[in-house]
Amino acid sequence: MTKTELVNAIAAKASLNKEQAKKALDATLESIEQALANEDKIQLIGFGTFSVQEKAARKCKNPRTGEIVDVPARKVVKFKASAGLGK
């Protein structure tokens, strides 16, 4: 599903026009992005939890050259689906 298809689905289910649905989706995504940038945890009951996880620095092997490469530490977004999401 693309963002446009999601906007159309939101508009249909919430009795909004497409512009209102797009604004609502953009505001939601922006709020989630800001919370994750602040390393907050976002828990949506019945859907899942977004959190920020720290990945440690490590050494990897480049498969093409066989050279050992240092991969720096980084932060990644983790999503854990709720138990009822896939049903």
Image (cartoon, rainbow, N blue to C red):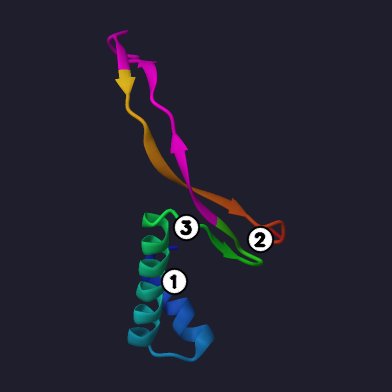
* Residue at image location 48% in from the left, 77% down from the top: 9
Q: Is residue 53 magenta?
A: yes
**Three-letter code for the amino acid on which mark 3 is drawn:** Asp
**Three-letter code for the amino acid on which mark 1 is drawn:** Leu
Q: Is residue 51 magenta?
A: yes
**Three-letter code for the amino acid on which mark 2 is drawn:** Leu
Q: Quadrant of residue 30?
A: bottom left
Q: Is 15 placed above or below 3 here?
A: below
Where does the magenta region start and end?
50-69
Residue 5 position in % (x across, y down): 41, 71
- Dot in front, 2 or 3: 3
- Whether residues under marks 2 and 1 lie with C-beta atoms below 8 angstroms apart, the answer is no
Which tag, 1 or 3, sits closer to the chain's start?
A: 1
Counting every numbered tag in the picture gives 3
Q: Which secondary structure lies at badge 3?
A: loop
- Whether residues under marks 1 and 3 lie with C-beta atoms below 8 angstroms apart, the answer is no
Check disc 1 and report the residue beneath it.
6
Whole-number angstrom distance, CA of label 2 to CA of label 1:
17 Å
Between 28 and 87, the residue placed more toward the observer is 28
